[in-house]
Amino acid sequence: TQLLEQSPQFLSIQEGENLTVYCNSSSVFSSLQWYRQEPGEGPVLLVTVVTGGEVKKLKRLTFQFGDARKDSSLHITAAQPGDTGLYLCAGSGYQKVTFGTGTKLQVIP
Amino acid sequence: GAVVSQHPSRVICKSGTSVKIECRSLDFQATTMFWYRQFPKQSLMLMATSNEGSKATYEQGVEKDKFLINHASLTLSTLTVTSAHPEDSSFYICSAREAASPLHFGNGTRLTVT
């Protein structure tokens, strides 16, 4: 059973636009990770957030962990074609990692 | 950064045969390894969790006799798809972690059963 819902499921935008992906759960996680996956490859870790309310920036990507550690968001500024991929959030609990439903992003040049 | 090597990257086999997929952690001790299955454009579906030296814990609906998992060392886990059928065709991915560290993923194995 998927406990992490991501929205939107699919997103197609023009180069230069901004976007936000949401990851929501009813469960509390000790930490949350964001991954990006390209076709035919394994997911690549982008960031880990641990503290409620934490905000981390990775160049044009901004990640936020909710105060209650149940949700997270990923904001991309001025999207580029290289940002295209499947974005996955993953919540870590006791001995288990739960993956979100995924957001397929396409950035059109 | 941590590297996880998965082999083979692609395999085609005939229906009824068995296929073994290897997952190795190259520069850390993987106390826990996970095996996932992924359908096109979808997220990862956890199949099983394996801790070194103990039996794997399978998710509900995953047949443990069909998907044999062995985690005999801190750097190697294998997934064997036994008596493969066309419906087993999929993208299989492993991940590994040391203690409570973030997951590191292999590059996946595309299995096609003809």
Image (spheres, grey):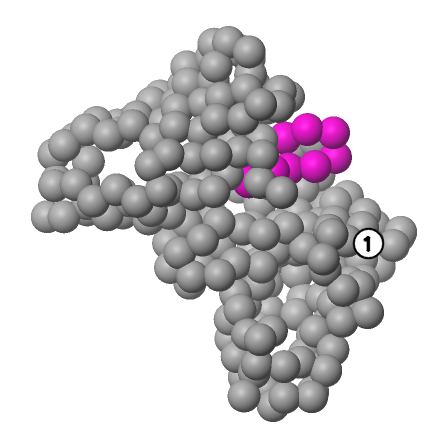
Is residue A33 found inside the magenta-colored segment of the image? Answer: no
State left or right for residue A92 relative to residue B80. Answer: left
State left or right for residue A47 relative to residue B93. Answer: left
Mark 1 lies on a secondary structure that is loop
Q: Residue at x 52, y 79 (%)?
A: B112
Location of residue B70 by image quarter: bottom right
Q: Give x and y (percent) for residue A101.
A: 47, 42
Q: Chain for mark 1?
A: B
Badge 1 is on which residue? B56
Query: Over which residues does the magenta segment extend?
Result: A92-99
State left or right for residue A93 relative to residue A38. Answer: right
Q: Give x and y (percent) for residue B66.
A: 76, 71
Q: Main secondary structure of the magenta part?
A: strand
Instruction: Reply above or below: A43 against A56.
Output: below
Q: Residue at x 61, y 38 (%)?
A: A98
State left or right for residue A86 relative to residue B81. Answer: left
Q: Amino acid at mark 1?
A: Ala
Location of residue B75 by image quarter: bottom right
Q: Give x and y (percent) for residue A45.
A: 48, 39
Q: How many marks?
A: 1
Q: Callout 1: few (<14), some (14-19), or many (20+) C-alpha neighbours within 10 Å?
A: many
Instruction: Reply above or below: A55 against A35.
Output: above
Q: Residue at x 58, y 23 (%)?
A: A26
Q: Is residue A21 visible?
A: yes
Q: Residue at x 66, y 70 (%)?
A: B21
